[in-house]
Amino acid sequence: MSETAIFEPKIVAYVCNWCTYLGADLAGTNRLEYPSNVRIIRLPCTGRIDFNLIIKALESGADAVVVSGCHPGDCHYTVGNYHARRRWILFRELIGTLGIDMDRIHFAWISAAEGKKFQQTITEITEQTRKLGPYTAYRKLCEASI
Amino acid sequence: MARIGVFICWCGENIARTVDVDQVTKEVAEIPGVRCAVNYKYVCSDPGQAMIRDRINADKLQGLVVASCSPHMHLKTFRAAAKAAGLNPYLVEMANIREHCSWVHHNRDEATAKAICLIRMAVGKVLRNRALDPIKVPLTKRALVIGAGVAGIQAALDVADAGFDVVLVERDPSVGGKMAGLSETFPTLDCSQCILTPRMVEVGQHPNITLHSYSEVESVEGYVGNFKVTVRKKARYVDIDKCTGCGDCWNKCPSKRKLSEFDYGLAPRKAIYMPFPQAVPARPVIDREACLHFIRNACGTCKKKCQADAINFADEDKLVTEEVGAVIVAAGYQLYDIAKAQKNPKYSGYGEYGYGQYKDVINSLQFERLVSASGPTGGEIKRPSDGATPKNIVFISCVGSRDNAKGISYCSKICCMYTAKHTMLYKHKVHDGTAHVFYMDIRAGGKNYEEFVRRAIEQDGAQYHRGRVSKITEEDGKLIVRGADTLAGVPVTVEADMVVLAAAMRPSDGVLELAQKLKIGYDEFGFLSESHPKLRPVETNTAGVYICGACQAPKDIPEAVAQASAAAAKVLVMFGKGELTREPEIAQVNEQLCAACYACVRTCPYNAIDKTEIRDRKGNLIKYTARVNPGLCMGCGTCVAVCPSKSVDLEGFSEQQVYEMVKNLI
């Protein structure tokens, strides 16, 4: 690897099927370019996304994780995103204890009409993660605990 | 070894321009478990689908990954193609290499690498997919309609005329609702009773309609296709089967007179009464609180006079259980209570108008009774205080509506029109009188509506003042209405003989409790929420429950009727099928693992998880567990995230499936 090579992080985006996935589709339809580092995983609702999925992604080699769903009040399942939000608030408190870097996990509300916001969010997160470098610290921690 | 087929689509140039499809095909063919990988120009086309079907048969494929566009675009298409070749449709997954790859990345190497990764993730997932069958839910082809105003009547008749049984529940002693008490209707001025009463009779006599009048919905259990509804039939003290409706009882009833609910307090009624002569069922009811028999066990005249022996003082409330497959809510509206104490102080105000203090200040529904031919004055306009004909009458619109300070920000929609109608009806009966209207704006959107208002102003000479009224006082038997005309820029004072207040429309009392029983949503004002304001206007978020009429939002009769027919059509769409099928991608509880903490039960937005117990053949309790009701689960997966023992999982998005995808990131 040459010295000038930029680190290309792997980013997992857990998104809900009804808002953010469609927002990402809209970004595609409008040809809004963003870095190719993100891997979108479609789930029915942000309510489905528990901590384990986030941690599993970091364990598996992701350098950052994004969770994104419908704006509060717009959930396809009425209240799923409220559960996600509440869980996120609790989880944030635990992150330090688990030894996870706060900058590695991101939370966003992106609606089906916000292709532009999807593009911006992913671009920003990719830039930020590039600067942070590979998340080997946590993976080492995982290996050490095994 | 699994046999997965991967189909990579060029999407013409859309994908192939930025993704090297040949390279992708070559690389994904090497993924363990992949039996064949092929690319094709348009996989979604007929030949493309034929290719999928051929490959499924030739290679005996056990799963498919189609790498093309968004699953929102073509997942159904490819699942149908798989099904046509005998492969379970839920063994098909898609990798979105168009919207999420070729369209948003311009670098060919990067896009190709990402496409390969996305396909690898999808292959990982599909290896963990399970064959699923659509869930079949039995369907009771019988509908419940709650509320028998014009909307409920229309909905009930539409469903009944299509040949299905309908249970119609009305909490008042008679069907008809608010419309039965109206005089004439805008914009045609045809008589409300003349239109409605034949429909009421039809409801009463229809062989497919079971009418529970003077009844309320007590509780609702079950789910779409299979509701179990308990109806409380309130004690009427009159056997409606024996009763002939002859009238001997109420003519002879000596009780002190109470004010008639149907005439909004403008006329008296007896303790045993029929709300109005055209009531359906045409049977009386005893008001326990006014009846001397119940007050001091003193009377019994009605029982003595009744030749049909229909009076039964020992009558009690009865609970009836009805099984239905769909529910239509047509609970209707009531008027904003002008300056009276209410449970919710948010919805009272305008004490300065003296309603309830001055007898000649009345609300619009009372005025309807005054001008109605069946009303207490026989259609002559006589003011309540002394029976004189008012020569100067003031109508005030927006009393409660469009005023955040008084708690209601919305427009009640019909007041502009009925106020114009009131001025016309007044003028047609009191030729030498003057009608004044104080208004904020005139909102007359609708077929022939604007023309109608113009007629009121131009032909019938109604005096319209754009402005609010600040105060009404009484001096020497006249009501002094102090307002403003903001167009002329002058204060206006009218010495009126009578004032009519166009009070805002609000949802009926009890509609919130009803919504909670049915698990449907409502807005901050208590109006029931539709599932989508444009595309699902009569559906609710609870499958099998539909709404129509003024309980959804303020609306006039034509709109209420149109919405009622729409709700009926939705019910008929459902009844047209033999049984209900639902997507099988729903939650499942591993009952062996479940620790019965019921975190899922509390979390589920659809109340789709039940607390159950497992018993052996002898009936001994083995364990408690949660169980998902497949008829109710919508597959959001919120329960999966909260389950501490991970004993609930979501088909199609299981823990294993997501883990497999994540594992294949690299």
Image (cartoon, rainbow, N blue to C red):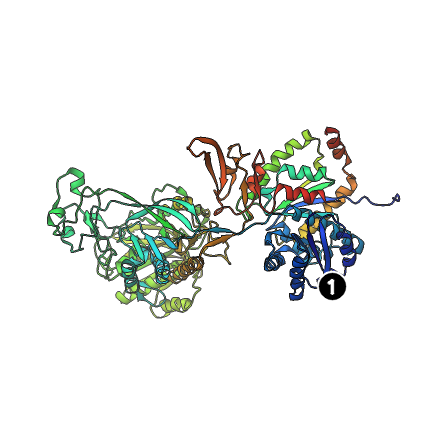
Q: Residue at x 69, y 41 (%)?
A: A65
Residue that sits furthest to the bottom in the current view: B459
Give the total number of marks visible in the rendering: 1
Above-or-below relation of A142 to A45: above
- Residue in view at x 54 percent, y 46 percent: B586
Quarter of the view holding residue B492? bottom left
Three-letter code for the amino acid on which mark 1 is drawn: Glu
Left or right: where B179 falls relative to B517: left
Q: Position of residue B299 (x, y in %)?
A: 12, 42
The answer to whether any part of residue B499 appears in the image is no
* Residue closest to the far right: A2
The percent position of residue B93, horizontal first and vertical second, equals 64, 52
Reply above or below: B253 against B442. above
Is residue B661 something one can see in this rendering? yes
Left of B618 or right of it: where is A57?
right
Q: Choose between A13 and B629: the one closer to the eye.
A: B629
In the rendered image, the quadrant that contains the C terminus of chain A is top right
Chain under disc 1: B
Up/down of B587 relative to B84, above or below: above
Q: Nearer the viewer, residue B556 or B30?
A: B30
Element carrying mark 1: loop
Residue A113 lies in quadrant? bottom right
Front in this rendered view, residue B629 or A37? B629
Query: How far from the left and from the top, in percent, is residue B262?
Result: 26, 53
Give the residue pinned by disc 1: B13
Which image quarter is the N terminus of chain A in? Answer: top right
